Image (spheres, rainbow, N blue to C red):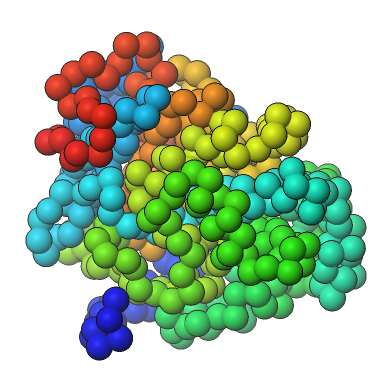
Amino acid sequence: MPRSAPLPPRPRRAAATALLLVAALAGPVLPNAAAGERPAPDAGARGGGGGTERELRRALAELVAAPGGPPGAIAVLTRDGVPRVYRAGTADTDTGRPPRPDDHMRIASAAKAFSGGVALGLVDRGALGLDDTLGQRLPHLPEAWHAVTLRQLLQHTSGLPDYSRSERFQAIVRADPRHRFVSRRLLEFAAPDLLFPPGSRYGYSNSDNIAVALMAEQATGRRYEDLLRELVYRPLDLRDTSLPSGFRLPRPFLHGYATAPGEAPEDVSEAVSASGAWASGGIVSTPADLGAFIGGYAGPALLSPGTRHAQRRFVPGASEPAGPGENAAGLGLFRYETRCGTVFGHTGNTPGYTQFAAATPDGRRTVTVSVTSQLTLDPALLARLRATEERFVCALLEDGHGDGPESGGGYGDPAA
């Protein structure tokens, strides 16, 4: 964006937007689905698959039309490099244009999978070890944290307290959602004591992936943003993915909204700074790039067989928000066991966006579902979203699915 471009207007409900950000960073304000809990399928769901092309499009349309639902939604199914695009609603309520696979968007906690890509890539290169500890790599951090390993950080079994739950951090965000944090000092907001002994149980924490990025920087002497480019973006040819530190989004972008039943959607796309999430949730990508990433990270493109084996040692634990089916946590990756089969991926939510990205174990089939509001704040909408995600996973796994008129060899934005 040119320096002379005017700043976007402050959101009308700045306080509400700040609370949304706090909720997104600290985890859903509503009870998260348990790792073994599966949402009830929506009324039209078939027991054996995702449904017809028309039913898939209708599922997205009904999500958008629900009270308080997102203004827009886009799902991309890709098989062996051939994408199919499904969409509903709009990418921008001012213009009414439809969502596109090349629209930029905040991917929220799906960024944690990218930090897994960096860390495990360094493990493959011998620069880091999964049993390296915070005490060895980052001895300036609280002494109670020193026994925590890289493996435990990536699997959320570290016991690190979540910096984003700190009252001091939350007060700054409430006062100014666009506050520019020093991202490498975010852990200073976390309490110095562990919540539980390392490795003893699962506990999702935004602090984990901040620590992962800091370990990667210490091991290489290079900035995390540069490591992302070298170890993830370039190998997977991700040309529209970045980790900004401010609040602006690259153009074009999928506008994100704060929504509530009976109220007009409020554009919060650029209401918050990415610096307060950094390696834990600050990445901006597109549906096309996100699908390419998850196929490479869940499949064989990025990691050696031995490191992939370690990545896929799962423990009970749900992503936030919970993905479809039964959830389990690996290293920077979650397993989603649905009624139609198993995929690996990650989810995320932040003001204006809720994300789901997953791939088959061989990485050859991928699915992304992106919606333009933070549906985790409404239990009914979240349940509907999880059922919709499961529909698309089932469609992805069906043999022969995708031979209809919208199939194509590129992201040509077919009518939906």
Q: Is residue 400 above or below residue 33?
A: above
Q: In the image, residue 333 lies at what x, y percent?
A: 61, 40
Q: Is residue 152 above or below residue 329?
A: below
Residue at 58% across, 55% down: 230
Q: Is residue 221 above or below residue 387?
A: below
Residue at 61% across, 60% down: 227
Specify the quadrant of the image occupied by residue 76: top left
364 left or right, relative to 126: left
Q: In the image, residue 169 lies at what x, y percent?
A: 59, 78
- Image quarter where the C terminus lies is top left
Residue 76 at least partly seen: yes
Residue at 27% across, 19% down: 402
348 left or right, relative to 165: left
113 left or right, relative to 339: right
Residue 37 at least partly seen: no
Q: In the image, residue 107 lies at what x, y percent?
A: 43, 54
Specify the quadrant of the image occupied by residue 186: bottom right
Residue at 42% across, 31% down: 366
- Image quarter where the N terminus lies is bottom left
